[in-house]
C-alpha cells in the first residue's frame, strides 16, 4: 500500500517532477564529488561505491555512482560542484515517533528506577495519561515550541523524513492540535512528515470503564481529521493497558473505509496477536513486536508487513524479551528501525543512536540496521521514493564524517553528520 504524494506531506520541499532527469539538458543543481556512497541499492549490504559522485536537480537525484562514470565534466554538468570526503548515505527515515508532546516524564523514569513497572505506572493513572494532561493545557503554538527542538535534533543527526503520531490528546481538539503541529514541523524544517492518527493510544479519564464508547468517538473523529488532510495512516495500542484486538479491529475497519493504511503497536508487552491483525488488514507495519509468535511472523511475511524494531523503548524499559529476529530473517520479513521518540518509553533524539541500539541489543549488523533506518523504514511508511541513493529518487542524503559505514552503528553520541540535504536543499548545518 502506498501513501500518495497528495495525501502525505512526506514530500515537503521536493517539487514533483515528471521530467526524466537527463532528458532536459539543463544543468544539475548540485554535484558532490569525492565521498564514498552507501547506495543501499540491491537486496543486502551497503551497495558501496568509493570515490563516488552524487548529482541532483529539482529535488531528485540525477546521478549516484562512481565519479569516473559521470556523463561529462563536473563543471559542465552542475551549477554547484562540491568536493568532499567521508561517506554519503540516504537520509534517515524515522518511521515511528511520538515527538509532538508537552512536558516530560523524568519523574516517572525515577520511579521506574526504583522498581515501578511501566504498566503499574500506567494503571495508576500516570504514564501516557500524565502526558495527556500536560498536552491538553497547551495551545498549538506552545506545543510547536516544545516539539520543534526534538524534530530539529533528529534532523541534525541525519533524519530527513519523520513519522509523527497523535495519541496524547485523546479528545478531538487535542488530537487535531497534535496533527496540525506535526504538519507545521514539516513546513518549518522542510523535513518530510507523515502523520499517524493514534487516538486509540490510551483510555482518557472521562471514558474510564467505557473503552467501547471511546472507540466509537475515535472512529467518528477520524473522517473529520482526514478531511482536513491531517491523517496519512492509522495506528492503535493493542495491549492489556491499551485496547483489545476487537477494539483495534474496529479502528482498522474505520481506516479501511477511508482507504487509509494501518500499522500497530503490536505485541510489545504481551502477545495479543497484534502482528497477525495488521497482516489481515494488509497494513504497513507491526511495531515493537517483542512478543510476536512464529504464527504472527508468518502472517506478516505473507502480507508483506514490515517489522518496526524500537530498541530505544527496549533499552529504556530494560526489557529482556527480544523480538523474534531469527524468524523475521528466516521468513523474509523486512526489519525497520525507528526511535519511538516519546516521553515515556523512549526519550531518544537520534535515529543514528537507534541504529547503535539495534546493533547492540538486537545484534543487527550495521548494514541491516542502516537499511532498517532508511529503505525499510520508507517501506514501513508506504514511501517508494526515498531510502536509497538511486537516480530518480528524492535527493535526501547525509554526508557523515566517518571512515567506514559501520561507524554509524558503533559510536555512542558524537557529531557525525557533516551535512544533511532534504530534497536537494542543505538543511544542516545551516
Ligand atoms: O511506543 N506503548 C505505547 N506507546 C509508546 C509509549 C508512549 C508513552 O509512554 O508515552 C511506545 O512505547
Ligand atoms: Fe510508539
Image: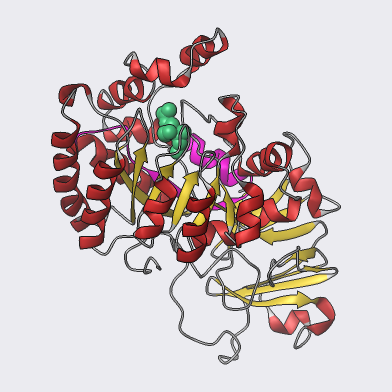
Q: 159 and 184: which one is in front?
A: 159
Label tally: 0
Where residue 146 sits, quadrant-wise, is: top left
Q: Is residue 151 above or below residue 400?
A: above
Which of 353 and 114 lies nearest the eye of the viewer? 114
* Farthest residue, direction top: 114
Is 294 included in the stretch rendered in magenta? no
Give the magenta-colored segment's residue range: 148-171
Q: Whole-percent x and y of residue 31?
A: 70, 72
Q: Position of residue 69 (x, y in %)?
A: 80, 84
Say if 289 sits above or below 84 in the image.
above
Q: Residue at 46% of width from left, 50% of height from top?
A: 286
**Residue 356 seen anywhere in this rendered image of the structure:** yes
- Left or right of residue 407, residue 135 in this image: left
From this view, report whether residue 240 is shown above or below residue 238. Answer: above
Task: Identify the image's colour scheme: rainbow, by chain, secondary structure or one colour.
Answer: secondary structure
Q: Residue furthest front?
A: 295
Horizontal placement of 163 versus 74: left or right?
A: left
Specify the quarter for ligand 1. top left
Residue 255 placed where, x, y %?
Answer: 25, 56
Q: Is residue 154 magenta?
A: yes
Identify the residue at horizontal 55%, vertical 66% (top origin).
386
Q: Residue at x 62, y 52 (%)?
A: 327
- Quadrant of image for the N terminus: bottom left
Quadrant for residue 311, please give it: top right
Residue 177 vs 298, above or below: the answer is above
The one nearer the camera, 120 or 377, is 120
**Is residue 426 at all visible to an observer of this figure?**
no
Q: Where residue 343 sits in the image (x, y, percent)?
A: 46, 27
Residue found at x 69% / y 72%: 42
Amino acid at each position: 500500500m502506498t501513501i500518495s504524494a497528495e495525501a502525505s506531506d512526506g514530500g515537503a520541499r521536493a517539487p514533483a517532477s515528471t521530467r526524466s532527469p537527463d532528458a532536459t539538458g539543463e544543468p544539475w543543481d548540485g554535484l558532490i564529488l569525492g565521498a564514498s556512497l552507501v547506495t543501499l541499492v540491491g537486496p543486502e549490504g551497503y551497495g558501496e561505491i568509493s570515490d563516488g559522485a552524487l548529482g541532483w536537480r529539482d529535488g531528485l537525484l540525477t546521478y549516484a555512482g562512481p565519479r569516473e562514470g559521470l556523463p561529462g565534466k563536473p563543471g559542465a554538468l552542475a551549477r554547484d560542484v562540491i568536493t568532499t570526503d567521508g561517506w554519503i548515505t540516504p537520509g534517515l527515515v524515522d518511521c515511528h515517533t511520538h515527538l509532538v508532546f508537552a512536558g516530560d516524564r523524568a519523574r516517572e523514569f525515577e520511579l521506574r528506577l526504583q522498581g515501578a513497572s511501566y504498566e503499574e505506572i500506567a494503571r495508576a493513572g500516570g504514564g501516557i495519561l500524565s502526558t495527556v494532561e500536560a498536552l491538553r493545557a497547551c495551545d498549538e503554538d506552545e506545543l510547536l515550541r516544545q516539539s520543534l527542538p526534538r524534530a530539529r535534533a533528529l534532523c541534525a543527526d541525519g533524519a530527513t523524513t519523520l513519522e509523527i503520531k497523535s495519541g496524547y490528546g485523546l479528545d478531538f481538539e487535542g488530537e487535531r492540535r497534535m496533527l496540525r503541529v506535526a504538519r507545521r514541523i514539516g513546513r518549518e524544517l522542510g523535513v518530510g512528515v507523515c502523520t499517524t492518527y493514534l487516538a486509540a493510544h490510551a483510555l482518557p479519564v472521562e471514558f474510564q470503564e467505557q473503552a467501547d464508547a471511546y472507540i466509537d468517538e475515535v472512529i467518528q473523529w477520524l473522517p473529520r481529521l482526514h478531511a482536513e488532510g491531517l491523517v496519512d495512516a492509522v495506528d492503535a495500542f493493542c495491549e492489556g493497558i491499551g485496547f483489545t484486538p476487537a477494539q483495534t479491529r474496529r479502528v482498522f475497519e474505520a481506516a479501511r473505509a477511508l482507504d487509509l493504511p494501518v500499522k500497530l503497536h503490536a505485541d510489545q508487552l504481551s502477545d495479543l496477536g497484534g502482528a497477525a491483525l495488521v497482516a489481515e488488514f494488509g497494513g504497513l507495519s507491526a511495531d515493537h513486536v517483542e512478543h510476536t509468535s512464529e504464527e504472527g511472523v508468518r502472517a506478516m511475511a505473507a502480507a508483506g508487513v514490515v517489522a518496526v524494531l524500537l530498541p530505544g523503548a527496549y533499552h529504556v524499559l530494560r526489557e529482556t524479551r527480544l523480538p523474534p529476529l531469527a524468524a523475521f530473517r528466516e521468513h523474509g520479513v523486512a526489519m525497520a528501525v525507528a526511535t519511538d521518540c516519546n516521553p515515556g518509553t523512549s526519550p531518544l533524539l537520534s535515529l543514528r543512536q537507534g541504529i547503535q541500539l539495534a546493533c547492540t541489543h538486537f545484534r543487527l549488523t550495521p548494514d541491516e540496521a542502516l537499511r532498517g533506518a532508511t529503505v525499510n523504514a520508507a517501506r514501513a511508511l508506504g514511501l517508494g521514493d526515498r531510502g536509497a541513493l538511486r537516480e530518480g529518487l528524492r535527493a535526501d542524503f547525509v554526508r557523515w564524517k566517518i571512515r567506514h559505514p559501520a561507524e554509524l552503528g558503533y559510536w555512542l553520541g558524537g557529531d557525525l553528520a557533516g551535512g544533511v540535504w532534504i530534497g536537494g536543499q542543505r538543511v544542516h548545518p545551516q
